Amino acid sequence: MLVVAVCGLAIYYFVSVSRRPGNVLVAATPTDVEVYLDGKRQPGSGTPLTIRSLKPGVYIVAVVKTGYERWNKEVEVKPGETVKLEPTLSALATATIELRTNPRDAEAYLDGRKLNGKTPMKITQVTPGKHTLEVKRPPYQTWSYELEVRPEQVLQLNARLLPAEVAVKISSEPKAEAFLQRDGQTERVGMTPASLKLNPKYPYVVVLKKEGYREWSKPIAFDGDAPVQIDATLERDTQTPTPTPTPTPTPKKTPKVTPKVTPKVTPKVIPKVTPKVTPKVTPKVEPKVEPKVEPAAMGWLLINSNPATRIIVDGTDTGLWVPQKRIPLSVGKHTITLRNPKFGIDESFPVVIKPGQPTKVIKNFPVSQP
């Protein structure tokens, strides 16, 4: 009986132990990877990652990251044990980013990681795929760019840093009321000449209004931190009727009437003409002036290119470089020119701006790699 009991306990222990689950611990380099077990992606973000409660047996573990070679290994999970894996992924052929900034001596960050040195710089060993590049140099605004590189690609980027504020002065002849438009909102600035400071990160349109003159508008073109001077000459609105005195009987009519008509007729003609003419002319003049103050219909241009280019609109250099998310333009057809002398880029093409809508343009120019 004792022998039977001992054998029973031994069998129970062996069966219970052999059925205990095991674990797999993955600690990869780099850490932001995806882990697969027998082809099934495991939940969680990055490593270290523990895959728990696995039945004893053989499994295939895979570690994957864009821009790196896939890592695979067959592992045996034993009852109650944890298998530890520390794979190091090998990067595929990498890319290079040549970064220049205006102004120089700025700090650069790739995917949130600060890079050594200051601009201009060459960023090597960039893994293929999507990345976020940031450039910082106080008091200038942070420049941010999302990019995607291919293996063995050499990407050249020119970052133009914008100041936090730029001085803008608006003058006109004659003096007029100045308004500032941004993102569909209009704000009164005051009478010209007017001085203000604006953030060049946003697109602005200056609108000038004066009764009896045509409405004048123009987008503000920033050029780095250089002050902006806007001078406008308003044109008279020839279609607007001028408020002239109401017509009255001229002296030429009086001598014709006087000899033929008795003096009693003269006082009857004058009072009858004056009240009838004056009220009819006055209400017709005022409403015709009001419609001339309607704001011009506007849309905007969203534009980007690779490599970076300078933007010229209808032959006028805006002083802006791509990317630009919102360049306000009047509705209708415009000619856009993208220019970068360094790479021999000078291309013009038409765009049609629709009211209240963005017109999107993205250009990829072929550039020979060094």
Image (spheres, rainbow, N blue to C red):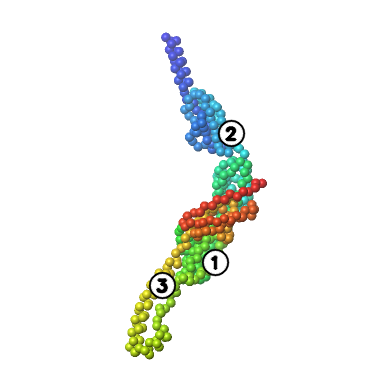
Tell which residue pokes out farthest to the top in this image: 1
Label 3 residue SS: helix
Task: State the residue at coordinates (36%, 80%).
Answer: 274
In the image, residue 355 lies at what x, y percent? 47, 57
Label 1 residue SS: strand
Label 3 environment density (alpha carbons within 10 Å; few <14, some 14–19, many ≥20): some
Viewer-nearest residue: 223 or 355 = 355
In the image, residue 112 lies at what x, y percent? 55, 44
Name which of mark 3 and mark 1 comes first in the sequence.
1
Task: State the residue at coordinates (53%, 28%).
Answer: 60
What label sits on residue 88 in the rendered view?
A: 2
Question: Which residue is the site of mark 3?
Answer: 285
Tell which residue pokes out farthest to the right in this image: 370
In the image, residue 320 lies at what x, y percent? 57, 56
Label 2 environment density (alpha carbons within 10 Å; few <14, some 14–19, many ≥20): some
Q: Amino acid at mark 3?
A: Val
What label sits on residue 231 in the rendered view?
A: 1
